[in-house]
Image: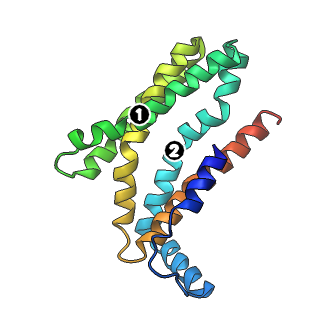
Amino acid sequence: MGIIAMFGVLRFPETLPEVSEAPLSQVMNTYGRLLLNPSYMIMVLVMSVSFFPLFSFIAGSSAIYINEFGLSEQKYSYFFALNAPCHYDWCLLLPSVNKKGEFKALDDNRICGSFPGGILLLFLGQHGPWSFALPMFMVSFSLGLSRPPSNNLALEQVDRDIGSASSLLIFTYFIFGAGEYVVHLSGMGG
């Protein structure tokens, strides 16, 4: 897969009409300005924290399904794979759910779906693979449904440097996710 991806990267021409000659200090100044924008940073931090359940699932689901529920690696892979469409099926529903462009109301779905899913995980999730999987599907679907409008809301807080703002937003998602993974590993003695 990596060779195919590399072939695609090398095969397609650069779409940027001209390469930026901006000095590193200007780039750092742009990120500094974004970091000092409180409305943008609050949105970025809230969104990053809200994805903890998904990153926790990615980090710990194998131990839960295999060690706790006694599933084989093959069966675990089915449960893990079933979670992916739950996270990404929102793209099929987003246009019909959000006909008026009311991103704030749609973004509330993250909480409306994630919170009950989390409660169900807390009280029922330890009873077996399906009692864990079904609430997690609910959480994943809610997070997937809210991600595009959440990104949009965060980027609306910025009046320029949208590309840098988008880059910092995604970077923060993954830094929080990586941090959570490290905490998960250290909690497991790994």
x, y percent for residue 100: 16, 49
Q: How far apart are the two marked residues, 2 and 1, measured between alpha carbons?
A: 12 Å
x, y percent for residue 45: 50, 57
Q: Which residue is found at the position 46% from the left and 52% from the top? A: 47
Q: Which residue is found at the position 59% from the left and 50% from the top? A: 5
Side of 190 relative to 149 (left or right): right
Which quadrant holds the C terminus? Answer: top right
Q: Secondary structure at mark 1?
A: helix
Q: Residue furthest right?
A: 189
In front here: 100 or 16? 16
x, y percent for residue 64: 66, 22
Q: Is residue 171 visible?
A: no
Which quadrant holds the N terminus? Answer: top right
Q: Which residue is mark 2?
A: 51
Say the numbered circle drawn on residue 141.
1
In front here: 7 or 86? 7
